[in-house]
Amino acid sequence: MAGRNHLFVPGPTNSPHAVLSAMHVPMEDHRSPIFPDLLKPILEDLKKIFRTETGQTFVFPATGTAGWEVALTNLLNPGDKVLIYRFGQFGHLWADMARKLGFDVELHEIEWGKGIPLDHLEARLKQDAAHEIKAVLATHNETSTGVTSDIGGVRKALDAAKHPAQLYVDGVSSIASIEFRFDDWGVDAAVSGSQKGFMLPAGAAILAFSQKALAIAETTTYPRAFFSLKDQINTNKDGYTPYTPSTPMLHGLRKAIDLLLEEGLDNIHARHHRLAEGVRRAVAVWGLKTCAQDGFHSDTVTAIVVPADKDARQVIGTAFHKYNLSLGAGLSEVAGKVFRIGHLGDLNEVSLLGALAGVEMALLDSGIDIKPGSGVGAAVEYYRNAL
Ligand SMILES: *Cc1c(COP(=O)(O)O)cnc(C)c1O
């Protein structure tokens, strides 16, 4: 098919050309005397992206999923109780991992489309007078439903309950795209991955840990090997890694961090909000609904619900085969019910308008009655005035 594929899944996202070029380097010796000149500034500058001055950042040759495991296995003792709300596929998988690793998972089911219920959380923490809950696992941006939760609010709930539980946050599809404040929110472990807001290929788990968490990791006894923070700390301090790093990935990360800091986090957040708002306006004039309910809309991904008698898989299939447009599928409970537009990473208004046009064609081809150009028109009006 002529022309490029239009990639609008919520990860992997589009990589800027400058990032791809930066990765296109000869292999090198990761034990050379100059390797620390690459790694040390990356770890330092990542703190700016997480908005932490006191925390410590890490890069593992792995994916976001591994980041969950790093947090759980380094910061807990075998059998510890953790609290998690499930309102999407990623929260589901994290809870499932915690259970498989033998932790005592207290799981609360929340309707898919909503986020963390802060009142419930505060009440539950207050009730836990014996402090049996050792960690709260919070999915900041639930990529399967396009729902963003209030992590500052989670911190307030912990403080209001005077509960010492650690706070682990899955920021895989939020960090480097929407507001994330590691220090201000008192996060103990923040998990991200390379292929979303960092605009790289998959293959790096990018993490931050608080000093409190690192002190806890000194005393906990859960078995850990490849994912040992201690091994990273011991080698990172001299600018090296415990095992062979992906050096092209690190060169790409260097460039991606430069681009992020050059644009500025506040500008990046504003851009993602603007892009998302145009999509939401398009969805509204199509007469469709987002999976996310009011107050929970994500600025990095929108999950759009198709009419009950239609199958979202048809929309996604048509978009791909006929129009060379890749949309995100509905996962698990919402399979067939929603399709997703990823609007994070290296992206601007005009490219997103192209995706909205493709969505309109795929919707019409799938027998979903919308007015051609209506969603694109709404987004066009919004973007013109918002820019
Ligand atoms: C993509 C994603 C993950 C999983 O990351 P992988 O890199 O696929 O392991 C976890 N959580 C959220 C919220 C995600 O969007």
Image: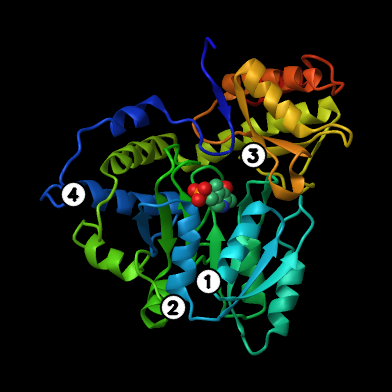
Front disc: 4 or 1: 1
- Local crowd size for mark 2, using a 10 Å CA cut-off: few (<14), some (14–19), many (≥20): some
Is the CB of mark 3 within 8 Å of ligand 1?
no
Question: Do callouts 1 and 2 mark residues in contact (Cβ within 8 Å)?
Answer: yes
**Mark 1 and mark 2: span between their CA atoms?**
10 Å
Q: Where 350 sits versus 251, above or below?
A: above
Image location of residue 323, percent across then percent down: 64, 16
Callout 3 amino acid: Val
Q: Earlier in the sequence, mark 2 or mark 3?
A: 2
Q: Is residue 11 visible?
A: yes
Of the pair 94 and 217, the residue shown nearer to us: 94
Q: Secondary structure at mark 3?
A: strand
Identify residue for label 1: 101
Q: Nearer the viewer, residue 380 or 133?
A: 133
Q: Earlier in the sequence, mark 4 or mark 1?
A: 4
The quarter in which the N terminus is drawn is top right
For the residues labelled 4 and 3, the Cα–Cα distance comes to: 36 Å
Q: Residue at x 46, y 58 (%)?
A: 67
Q: Position of residue 81 (x, y in %)?
A: 60, 79
Amino acid under disc 1: Leu
Q: How dense is the environment of label 4, judged by Cα within 10 Å: few (below 14), some, or many (20 and up)?
A: some
Which quadrant would residue 282 be assigned to in this image? top right
Kindly tell me whether residue 183 is visible in this rendering: no
The reply to whether callout 4 and callout 2 are in contact (CB within 8 Å) is: no
> In the picture, which quadrant includes the C terminus?
top right
Numbered label attached to residue 219: none
The answer to whether 371 appears left or right of 297 in the picture is right
Q: Residue at x 47, y 41 (%)?
A: 195
Q: Residue at x 35, y 41 (%)?
A: 253
What separation in Å lies between label 4 and label 1 (alpha carbons)? 32 Å
- 4 or 3: tag closer to the N-terminus: 4
